[in-house]
């Protein structure tokens, strides 16, 4: 499978290229990053005018999604969007592009998070009287709060709790309402990513936790998504599509 990597000089882009280079079935067509310095001739500052590739994987920044998808549409290349923190306008652009090309979009490329989200949704359904809180922890350099993954988990729970309101952080005076899903963000050191969903009905507590021990798992997940997407027709796909 021939792959273009956007955001090639970032931590995730570099890890992805490392995995591509060590694979017998994947080939790096080129990488693009504004920070390219010529050290690797395969990595350029801008996406090439045209390229023969089976898929493009984006690990750059959410603000680049419009340009990235325009390029993918122009060249009829399926796109894996692995960035987070998208605005509503950017999300609308992703949905629009999926009408023309295959697009894989997930706030988290971990298969484990896909499983956690299913568990959380099921637990919320089985314990309708339980209050729910989500706690996410990341390294101190992460820009968006709460994490896209925490919001993904909350959205999955909302499927069975349609009246749920997301409350990001909590301060001041006042009791929590039952319909709240509290979302709390911690930023510490070099934590790759930890997400915990807590359900409590006053009689018992359920705690569901996923810990990412290495960023390599996100690159591996993006490659699995790319393999999945290369065989699909136009449309919008996510980790649920991959595991179901």
Image (cartoon, rainbow, N blue to C red):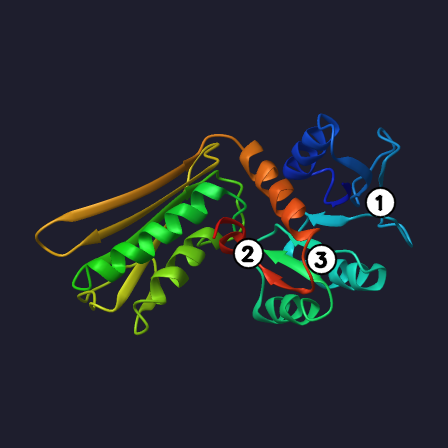
Give percent across and percent down for residue 221.
57, 41
Mark 3 or mark 2: name the one nearer the start of the chain.
3
Tell me the residue at 44%/54% (across/down). Answer: 146
Look at the numbered disc 2 and give the secondary structure of its residue: loop
125 relative to 211, above or below: below
Furthest residue in direction right, as rendered: 49
The reply, left or right, for residue 152 in relation to residue 228 is: left
* Cα distance between the residues tagged 1 and 3: 14 Å
Q: Quadrant of residue 3?
A: top right
User: Would you say the residues marked 1 and 3 are in contact, meaning their CB atoms lie under 8 Å apart?
Assistant: no
Give percent across and percent down for residue 176.
20, 65
The reply, left or right, for residue 50 in relation to residue 216 is: right
101 relative to 49, above or below: below
Q: Number of callouts in the render?
A: 3
Mark 3 crowdedness (10 Å alpha carbons): few <14, some 14-19, many ≥20 = some
Q: Visible in this render: residue 59?
A: no
Mark 2 or mark 1: name the one nearer the start of the chain.
1
**Disc ID at residue 118:** none
Mark 2 crowdedness (10 Å alpha carbons): few <14, some 14-19, many ≥20 = some
Give percent across and percent down for residue 155.
40, 63
Tell me the residue at 49%/54% (across/down). Answer: 240
* Cα distance between the residues tagged 2 and 1: 28 Å
**Residue with the mark numbered 3:** 64
Give percent across and percent down for residue 210.
38, 40
Mark 1 crowdedness (10 Å alpha carbons): few <14, some 14-19, many ≥20 = some
**Residue with the mark numbered 2:** 238
Look at the numbered disc 3 and give the secondary structure of its residue: helix
Q: Nearer the viewer, residue 234 or 105?
A: 234
User: Would you say the residues marked 3 and 2 are in contact, meaning their CB atoms lie under 8 Å apart?
Assistant: no
User: Would you say the residues marked 2 and 1 are in contact, meaning their CB atoms lie under 8 Å apart?
Assistant: no
**Residue with the mark numbered 1:** 45
């Amino acid at each position: 499978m021939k792959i273009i990597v956007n955001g090639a000089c970032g931590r995730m882009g570099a890890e992805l290229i490392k995995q591509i280079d060590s694979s017998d079935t994947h080939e790096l067509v080129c990488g693009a990053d504004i920070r390219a310095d010529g050290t690797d001739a395969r990595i350029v500052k801008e996406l090439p005018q045209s390229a023969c590739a089976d898929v493009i994987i984006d690990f750059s920044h959410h603000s680049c999604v419009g340009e990235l998808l325009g390029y993918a549409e122009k060249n009829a290349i399926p796109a894996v969007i692995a960035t987070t923190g998208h605005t509503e306008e950017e999300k609308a652009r992703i949905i629009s592009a999926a009408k023309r090309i295959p697009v894989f979009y997930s706030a988290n490329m971990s298969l484990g998070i896909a499983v956690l989200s299913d568990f959380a949704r099921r637990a919320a359904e089985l314990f309708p009287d339980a209050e729910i809180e989500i706690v996410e922890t990341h390294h101190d350099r992460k820009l968006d709060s709460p994490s896209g993954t925490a919001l993904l988990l909350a959205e999955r729970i909302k499927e069975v709790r349609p009246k749920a309101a997301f409350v990001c952080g909590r301060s001041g005076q006042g009791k929590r309402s039952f319909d709240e899903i509290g979302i709390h963000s911690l930023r510490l050191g070099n934590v790759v990513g930890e997400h915990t969903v807590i359900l409590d009905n006053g009689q018992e507590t359920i705690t569901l936790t996923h810990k990412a021990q290495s960023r390599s798992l996100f690159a591996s997940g993006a490659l699995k998504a790319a393999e999945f997407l290369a065989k699909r027709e136009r449309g919008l796909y996510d980790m649920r599509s991959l595991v179901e």
